């Protein structure tokens, strides 16, 4: 349901972008701008180069689903920055490909074609900090308002630009890691978090910027209680827990980012390399939809991953409600939740709600 002027404006921008045909070679590509890009209230905006063929061009979620996306999500995670608190976009919103169908850098003309879209996103979201990921994104910001920054000289510095701060960072893709190691990039993302915290005291509350680890304790508790569970079920069960928490407690108990995808709610935070958080306890079968098994480590395991009594009660309640449901029935259950019903109603009115943020 549309409630604010910004939401209406954002939907208009998404519509304009999906109708955009300025770049001939982008014909047939996904226009990667939707509610899956992140929160329009976010204090942090990350700007990449362009959607990747195996990443956002496939998943419609920027920096998600390919190696660059894995690296980006790992960098965010290590620095404790949640997807829920950021908006991620690209200098060009479609995936430029060469004649062989491989990723190719956007042409200068394509960057210029898309710069209005970038400017509209910045004006609408009004992030306190803008992080450019790589040289192309830095060039695009220069078109919006001139600056003399170069990636090599200005990496990890905060610079006044366009009524906010601009922090040039390297691209998280494998090629850029040759110039700036993953280790160095981790420090860059910590710097982003710290800069936001400092700014939060003066300008904008930083309370939403840094994730506590409770979200992952909730995941661990769910896995422990279920023992063995498919990744499909885990996405849906976490959504049900947070949806129930939103109704009962006034807000989700995790800081995860859920969007509506074809088979229902999808937790973006469970799309990357999150398994590595539980290296000693979690086993996953190798398949498109893995089965996850929690290996308990006795007393030590019990002491880890504590959640509040309220959270535990919700986790148990959803476990009881869903344990006898097969995947089809579970899918029906999530479709009967209020956010999903709302979006299905919008779809009947001709509005595409795929990739809309659910919680
Ligand atoms: S890259 Fe930008 S300007 Fe070019 S077609 Fe896509 S949305 Fe339009």
Image (cartoon, rainbow, N blue to C red):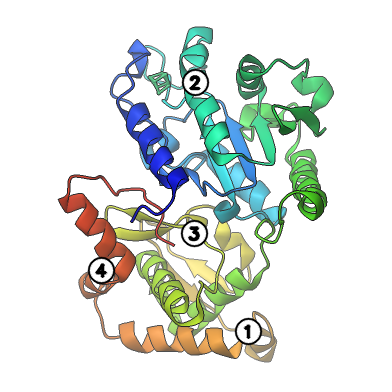
Which quadrant of the structure image shows residue 167?
A: top right
Mark 2 vs 3, N-terminal side:
2
Name the residue at 53% across, 73% down. Answer: 219
Label 2 lies in ligand 1 vicinity (Cβ under 8 Å)? yes
Q: Do tag 1 and tag 4 residues touch (Cβ < 8 Å)? A: no
- Within-10-Å neighbours for mark 2: few <14, some 14–19, many 20+: some
Q: Do tag 3 and tag 4 residues touch (Cβ < 8 Å)? A: no
Q: Which quadrant of the rendered structure holds the C terminus?
A: bottom left
Residue 291, position as x, y percentages in the image: 40, 68
Please tell me the numbered disc located at residue 32.
none
> On the rendered structure, is 337 left or right of 92?
left
Please tell me the numbered disc located at residue 297.
1
Which residue, given by chain and number where applicable, does mark 2 sit on?
Answer: 116
Cα gap from disc 1 to disc 4, whole angstroms: 32 Å
Cα gap from disc 3 to disc 4, whole angstroms: 18 Å
- Total marks shown come to 4
């Amino acid at each position: 349901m549309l409630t604010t002027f910004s939401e209406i404006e954002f939907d208009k921008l998404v519509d304009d972008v999906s109708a955009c045909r300025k770049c001939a070679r982008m014909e047939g590509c996904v226009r990667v701008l939707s509610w899956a890009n992140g929160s329009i209230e976010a204090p942090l905006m990350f700007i990449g180069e362009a959607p990747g063929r195996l990443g956002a061009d496939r998943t419609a979620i920027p920096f998600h689903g390919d190696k660059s996306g894995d690296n980006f999500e790992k960098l965010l995670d290590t620095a404790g920055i949640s997807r829920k608190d950021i908006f991620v976009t690209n200098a060009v919103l479609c995936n430029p490909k060469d004649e062989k169908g491989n990723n190719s850098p956007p042409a200068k003309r394509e960057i210029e074609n898309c710069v209005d879209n970038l400017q509209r996103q910045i004006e609408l979201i009004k992030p306190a900090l803008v992080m450019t990921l790589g040289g192309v994104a830095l060039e695009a910001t220069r078109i919006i308002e001139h600056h003399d920054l170069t990636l090599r000289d200005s990496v990890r510095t905060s610079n006044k630009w366009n009524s906010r701060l601009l922090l040039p960072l390297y691209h998280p893709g494998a090629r850029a890691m040759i110039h700036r190691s993953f280790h160095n990039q981790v420090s860059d993302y910590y710097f982003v978090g710290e800069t936001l915290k400092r700014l939060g005291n003066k300008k904008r509350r930083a309370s939403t910027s840094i994730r506590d680890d409770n979200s992952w304790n909730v995941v661990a508790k769910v896995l422990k209680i279920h023992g063995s569970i498919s990744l499909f079920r885990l996405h849906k069960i976490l959504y049900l827990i947070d949806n129930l928490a939103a109704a009962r407690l006034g807000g989700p108990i995790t800081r995860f980012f859920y969007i509506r995808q074809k088979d229902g709610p999808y937790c973006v935070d469970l799309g990357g390399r999150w398994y590595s958080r539980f290296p000693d306890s979690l086993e996953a079968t190798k398949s498109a939809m893995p089965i996850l098994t929690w290996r308990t480590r006795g007393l030590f395991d019990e002491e880890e991953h504590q959640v509040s009594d309220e959270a535990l009660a919700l986790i148990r309640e959803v476990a009881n409600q869903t344990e006898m449901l097969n995947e089809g029935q579970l899918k029906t259950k999530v479709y009967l939740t209020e956010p999903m019903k709302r979006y299905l109603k919008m779809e009947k009115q001709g509005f595409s709600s795929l990739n809309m943020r659910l919680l």
